[in-house]
Amino acid sequence: MLDLVMHWPLRLQADASRVVVRPFHIPIESKNGEKSRPRRIVEGVLEMDDEAAQRELVAVLKDFEARHWQTRSVFKTRYAEISNGLSLDDSAIPEVKQQLIGAFFCHEYSYAAAAIMNPSIVRHPDQSGLSEGSSRIVMSLRTVGEGHISSIAFREGIQSPGARFELAPEPPFATAVDGARELDNGAIEVRRNRDSTLSGTVIFPMTAAQSKGLEDLRLVEFTHDDGDVEWLGTYTAYNGESIRSELIRTHDFRTFELAPMSGPAARNKGMALFPRRVGGDYVMAGRQDGENLYLIRSRSLTQWAEGELLLTPRYPWEMVQIGNCGSPIELDEGWLLLTHGVGAMRKYSVGAVLLDKDNPEKVLARTPVPLISAAAEDREGYVPNVVYTCGALRHGELLFMPYGVADSAVGFAFVPIKDLVASMV
């Protein structure tokens, strides 16, 4: 490996104590003319006398209210959904029973119990109140919970001058985004709760195409031709059988649009968007054949045809497969694109290539040996021998790179950009 990397001692680990309240879905529809299970549950609550219902609700709140933010409000929201599905008469149902009905259709979910991995990082939209040389950051994380379902979590932090940073503490309560609203072309819009911090926000799968996971978000701060800045990210939507690439869009990390992408290239994983248009086109680096890396151009952010071959494996550490590790970073020398390579024994490594700034189809140089490779303590975990990042960030003269460790933890590294470029051949 290149002897350039400075490792930060912090490690983020899977954490079963991070829980949110999620809807517990039971089909509303009845079968064979029989009363549906949700209706039987509701009728069971309605048959309770007021005192018994109060006792049951108090017992539920004793177990869960201290573990979640605005638990009673969550129960009422869930009740409203059930009421709408079953056409209940809300005026005839006391508040206590409404909350109790809501509780029967919720469950607690530990979203990061199994794994935490594959981070990406961007500048925060809010850069106010910082000392010179510091910047506020947003990091996305792939978290895995029960059923191997992946979701998107966030952490905020501050980078200080030099190779230093600090993550903001996680709030005691985590909350899922809400208010899913259907938009055109199959997109949905969701909102962070107005009282929740970004570090306590989780985006769960919400559509049929996403039902088994939102995987490996690659965030980028994108500057449009008119100067408007938007935070975009590509991720893999998985439904248990098939995958597709989708796009997340936000201006403030409060409201998010999640939109499907179409075209032959969008049927694959690992698409990473350039931070601005190049030659009038939106540009992606991505895999199309599970082995090589391609450059893909489009006039639309959501329509992606097949691309041109950009990189093939050259060195033993990438002989099995090569792909990107997040969006390219613009330097004076060209586009710096982090790559991942897979070698013998399915061992992952992270390297880099330099692409021509005006014609990114042209490879100027690449690292002959990895920046980071699975070794020592980085080998053991949920999926051994894997190191992987979904995006790094330039901070002064350094590259700040969070990375996944064996699909079980997240580590952090700094790399001098000048030395990295000089190491390429």
Image (cartoon, rainbow, N blue to C red):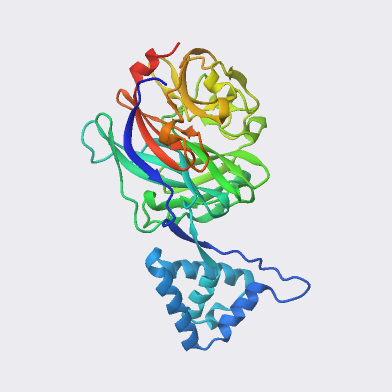
Q: Seen from this angle, which residue lies furthest right?
A: 32
Q: Is residue 347 left or right of residue 5?
A: right
Q: Seen from this angle, which residue lies furthest left?
A: 131
Which quadrant of the structure image shows residue 36?
bottom right
Residue nearer the viewer, 72 or 179: 72
Q: Is residue 34 above or below residue 204?
A: below
Q: Is residue 34 left or right of residue 355?
A: right
Q: Residue at x 43, y 53 (%)?
A: 192
In the rendered view of the protein, which quadrant contains the C terminus? Answer: top left
Can residue 178 be seen from the camera position used here?
A: yes
Q: Residue at x 75, y 70 (%)?
A: 31
Q: Position of residue 274 (x, y in %)?
A: 49, 27
Q: Is residue 27 above or below residue 227?
A: below
Q: Position of residue 379 (x, y in %)?
A: 47, 35
Residue nearer the viewer, 189 or 245: 245
Q: Residue at x 50, y 59 (%)?
A: 109
